[in-house]
Image (cartoon, rainbow, N blue to C red):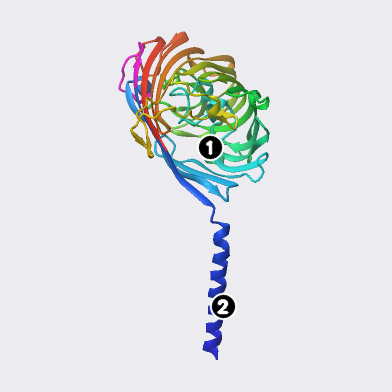
Amino acid sequence: MKKTSAFLPTRVSMAVAVVCIGISMPAFAQVEAKVTGRVQFDARNHTSSAATVDDRDSASYADNYEIRRARIGVSGTINKDIAYEVVGNAVGSSANFVDTAFANYGFNKAAQFRAGRFKQPFSLEELTSSNSIDFMERSYGNQVVPGKRLGIMLHGEPTKGMTYGISSFQQDFSQGVSSQNLGQSNAARLAANLAEMQGIGDTVIHVGYAQAKMYNKVANVTSSSGGTTTTATVLSMRSENRGINNAYRIRLNGDSVTTGYSVVGQTLTSVENSLTGTEFAAARGPFKFQMENFRNYVKASSVGGSANVNHAANYYEVMYNITGESWSKAYRGGAFSGITPGSIYMKDYGGVVGNGIGAWQVGLRMSDYTVDEGTVTTASTGSKTGKTSTLALNWLLNNNARVMLNYSETKFGTAFIPVDTAGNSIDSERTISMRTQVNF
């Protein structure tokens, strides 16, 4: 009897399990997943009066090959309304492999909820994927925007042509170096395509405005082998097209430590950024004009000093699709994606026979930054102003491969001596760069 009674519940349990599996399978049958990735390989030639020195600090203005991005991941949906993405970054200075990892609950398209690591709602340029940006590198303003951060966001499209996003996030993977309060940093953006709202075809008239408040804690470290006073960088600019690093830099003194290079102090430097951004883009057919203005108020304090600085950056660009592709087809959700080539260069592309020339683009961007030092207790280095002009020629073989050629020329407001250049000052820089890219 004991044997029978033990066996019967087991069979019942198995039957229940089979029924549950049968019920569950239809509920989760609409899980979709696709592998996603990108590889971008760059070559750069820099020209300036800066001396060539065998030092880690001078590496930014040396000619170089670079794997700019190498990412692999998976994205998809669950029952259509829940979207997810997990992407790893194989290159870069961060020890954390995660590039993006989030879940997006889109049951109500006007009020969606996202949680994880994702791009914060700020800047038209930043919200355009690196697969589709017009130039090899983004503008000066992009060096201070929130970018990808851990947090939560409410976003959506409440009406045709209008999008919004409101987020709460932290500055790094570790909350301890961001702030002691959860979600103290935040961002908000509102954008509209007036052409879509008015039903104007083949046209984009984009306007947008965003604000962000960011709190960060920066480690104080020594910067020389004989140093005993730690410092922390609270604002730095790199010339566009991956040019000279620390073209402008503010460091504040921290605490005193034992002599040595990269010795970490006991204290942290507090940095607060109050950032605003305005966006405008107008496109019709193959022509596009785009601009953004960034205003950043930086407030920083440490045991050895403080800084109150007004920082501004702007860019203005024009892009033209020589082969006639329309920009309006590449605009969705308050940002631009990549255009679809009207013809395919490769002979066999997913079963579609090509022999076309692909898509060709030409563009010009004018970009600048300005720093107005209100109060800085430690002397800054570099030039407080910089202007860069960049010419671009892009060849899109198909939706998954392109070649980019950029030429940029930067003029600094004042001549300065870059880090570790044995006294050679510069006031300008020229950079030629080329990228080969595949994405899927």
**Residue 16 location in percent, x, y?**
57, 72
The reply to whether the C-beta atoms of the residues labelled 2 and 1 are less than 8 Å apart is: no
Task: Identify the secondary structure beneath mark 2.
Answer: helix
- Residue 335 seen in the figure: yes
**Residue 319 location in percent, x, y?**
49, 18
Q: Which residue is mark 2?
A: 12
Image quadrant occupied by the C terminus: top left
Q: Which disc, if any, is residue 172?
A: 1
**Residue 380 location in percent, x, y?**
50, 17
Between the C-alphas of marks 2 and 1, the distance is: 51 Å
Locate residue 362: give its quadrant.
top left
54 and 205: which is toward the camera: 205
Q: Which marked residue is nearer to the observer: mark 2 or mark 1?
A: 2
Residue, far front:
353
Amino acid at the residue labelled 2: Val
Q: Please, is residue 205 above or below residue 41 in the view? A: above
Locate residue 301: give its quadrant.
top right
Q: Is residue 362 magenta?
A: no
Image quadrant occupied by the N terminus: bottom right
Q: Is residue 50 magenta?
A: yes
In this picture, residue 200 sits left or right of residue 348: right
* Label 2 packing within 10 angstroms: few (<14), some (14-19), many (20+): few
Task: Identify the secondary structure beneath mark 1.
Answer: loop
- Residue 207 seen in the figure: no
Residue at (47, 23) in percent of width and height: 134
Region rendered in magenta: 44-57
